[in-house]
Image: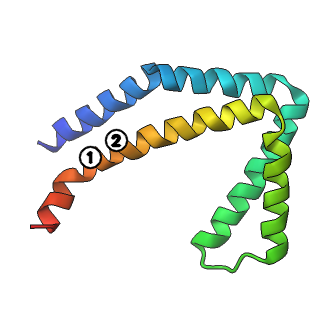
Amino acid sequence: MSGNLYDAAYALEKAIRQSEEYTQLQQMYSEVNADPEAKAMFDNFRHIQMNLQQKQMMGQEISEQEIQQAQATVAVVQQNEKISRLMQTEQRMSMIIGELNQIIMKPLEELYTK
């Protein structure tokens, strides 16, 4: 039975990869990577973002200076049209993944809310 679950998961992965949203995300990411200035800005943004997430997961406090640096970086990054489009496309993809997660978790939610 669990094999069927994994088969369904791999089928979902394939459907995601073939989706218009994922294809668009790939295209936006390629455009950012093809532009050295945009790529450097985006890489810096991702580095800051990952460091903050890692600190948060480890239970470490994020300083006011780090928050200000992150906010300033976001403001600069969003001014770049290519990165802004990438982030919007990434947001749409993230929403889809969230909706899929809700569907997948529905049996457990129903089980525990009875």
Name above or below for residue 4 compared with residue 33.
Answer: below
Task: Determine whether, in the image, residue 59 is placed left or right of residue 5.
Answer: right
Q: Tell me the residue at 41%/46% (across/down).
A: 98
Q: Tell me the residue at 86%/46% (across/down).
A: 76
Task: Determine whether, in the image, residue 107 is placed left or right of residue 27.
Answer: left
Residues 4 and 35: in front is: 35
Q: Quadrant of residue 16?
A: top left
Q: Tell me the residue at 91%/32% (across/down).
A: 37
Q: Residues within 10 Å of mark 1 (few under 14, many from 20)?
A: few
Q: Secondary structure at mark 2?
A: helix
Q: Which residue is mark 2?
A: 100
**Quadrant assignment for the N terminus:** top left
Name above or below for residue 58 compared with residue 111.
Answer: below
* Rendered location of residue 32, percent (x, y): 77, 28
Q: Which color scheme is applied?
A: rainbow
Is the C-beta separation of discs 1 and 2 under 8 Å? yes
* Rendered location of residue 28, percent (x, y): 67, 25
* Rendered location of residue 4, percent (x, y): 17, 36
Q: Tell me the residue at 15%/59% (across/down).
A: 110
Q: Quadrant of residue 57?
A: bottom right
Query: Alpha carbon of mark 1 to alpha carbon of mark 2: how far?
Result: 6 Å
Three-letter amino acid code of the residue under disc 1: Ile
Q: Quadrant of residue 56?
A: bottom right
Q: Secondary structure at mark 1?
A: helix
Task: Determine whether, in the image, residue 113 is placed left or right of residue 20.
Answer: left
Q: Which mark is residue 81?
A: none
**Quadrant assignment for the C terminus:** bottom left
Q: Which residue is mark 1?
A: 104
Three-letter amino acid code of the residue under disc 2: Leu
Task: Determine whether, in the image, residue 46 is placed left or right of residue 44.
Answer: left
